[in-house]
Amino acid sequence: MSEFTEALNYLIRVLKKKIGDTTFSYLQPGLTYDEIEKLVKNLPIKFPPEFYELYQWKNGYKRKPEALSRKFLEYFPLEIAVEKYLAKQKHYNPSWMLENDSFSPNWFQLYPEDMELALETGYLVMDKFYNRASLIYIDIKDGDIRREYASLTSMMMTEAECYERGINSYKLPLLNENKNYQSYLTWRKYNISLIDMFIRRLSNNFSLKILESFEVNDGMYRYKDLRIVEFLIHLIELKIPENITSEEYIEYMDGRSLATHYLGEQGYIKAVPTLIDLLQDKYESTRLEAVHSLHKLKDERARQPLIKILQDSNKKVRLEAARALADLDAYSKVRETVTIALDEIENIDNAEPQLMPQKHCISTIGSIGPIEPIGPIKPIEPIEPIRPIRPIGSILSLLHIH
């Protein structure tokens, strides 16, 4: 028995247990191997064995299923899928279209456009370099990748387990969002090979320039792994090359800023010590990205370093540090006092150091201490004129924070 057949049987068992219906009356009877081969033999792509197994089991839908939870079985009848593929190829222009474009000969549309629920469509994408075929769902509106599975088998296993456990698999799982954490772990269990291949690609080109690639940028948001964090930390720690031009220096520093940004997107607290060190970086963009990333990670170790960075010379860094401190939910009084800094820093440009409102914020927050109960808040020294403190809601609205 093949892995695909085992995955399909697992899915059928789950559906039978959950909904009691495994007749799949909305699907057409399967094709023979020869019938499938006749339809696809002249196409410029080679399909994996699991593709043949899928269409030998059932030849796609004859009507849309009523249960939305079974949309992963709502795939095109093969003759319609081939017809749509050939129609798209008439519009493919290799001179300006990329290989990762849905019009590419390597992309075979397997699922129809879902215009009601998820607003996505699914493609089987052949990768000649890795000799594999992954399943990719893209957003109908902007073409961005929504979800990716290492194979049809991996998709079946992921969807079956998510459905069995009541986990929503339709949203892109993010490691630092608790509501999607179990979804991510389930996806990772069956699709770790995608992350392995991404990391191999990174390792084969150990330089800051690789971060400029569209594929790498996309992978940094979709794949979460400690190995990626370690890779980014090593990149950041690279010494500045000798005898470089000013233009090359700017590119180098921009690369470090981008790596700092990705550390926050990865969602692992292992990055916190490195990010705290980067708060002292001489490059303003890197400091700002470090604060952004620490804001995302919400780790208490960053509290005191973020308080210190409220004295930064860059206004954007100060504002983001104040927002990060206000968002450390474990210290409710921090939110109360930092709103003062949010209110005042917004209108500060060149005040004298002794009048900088963040200094008052520092003394106030510093008086709180690391444990409850929280002591009394020190009064703020008068600044002429003293404006009334806005309610938190109006401050957040002013800063476009929703």
Image: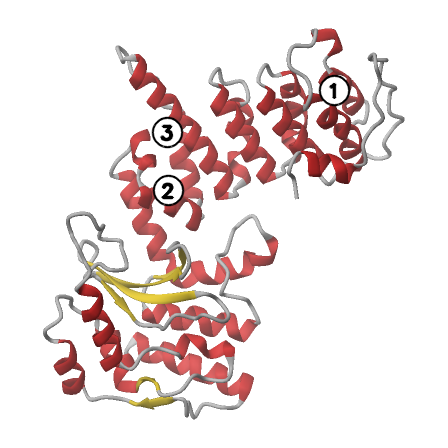
Q: Is residue 55 left or right of residue 279?
A: left
Could you tell me which secondary element the residue under label 3 belongs to? Answer: helix
Q: Which residue is mark 3?
A: 235
Q: In whole angstroms, how far apart are the C-alphas of marks 1 and 3? A: 33 Å
Name the quarter where the N terminus is drawn: bottom left
Q: Give the residue pinned by disc 1.
A: 362
Which x, y percent locates residue 283? 46, 18
Q: Can you tell which mark lies on residue 217? A: 2
Specify whether 108 is left or right of 169. Answer: left
Which residue is depicted at the point 45% across and 65% down?
119
Residue 392: quadrant of the picture: top right
Q: Nearer the viewer, residue 358 or 118?
A: 118
Near mark 1 (Cα within 10 A), the count class, few <14, some 14-19 or many ≥20, is many
Q: Is residue 321 left or right of residue 272?
A: right
Q: Amino acid at mark 2?
A: Asn
Residue 51, placed above or below residue 141:
below
- Asked whether the beta carbons under mark 2 and mark 3 sit within 8 Å of each other, the answer is no
Q: Which mark is residue 153?
A: none
Residue 141 visible (yes or no): yes
Quarter of the rendering occupied by the C terminus: top right
Q: Closer to the camera, 144 or 34? A: 144
Q: In the rendered view, tell whether residue 392 sits above or below residue 247.
A: below
Choose the circle earlier in sequence order: 2 or 1.
2
Q: Do tag 1 and tag 3 residues touch (Cβ < 8 Å)?
A: no
Q: Counting other residues with Cα less than 10 Å from the Cα at mark 2, is it few (<14), some (14-19), or many (20 or more)? A: some
Q: x%, y% of residue 322?
A: 67, 28
* Distance of label 2 from label 1 (alpha carbons): 36 Å
The earlier-in-sequence mark between 2 and 3 is 2
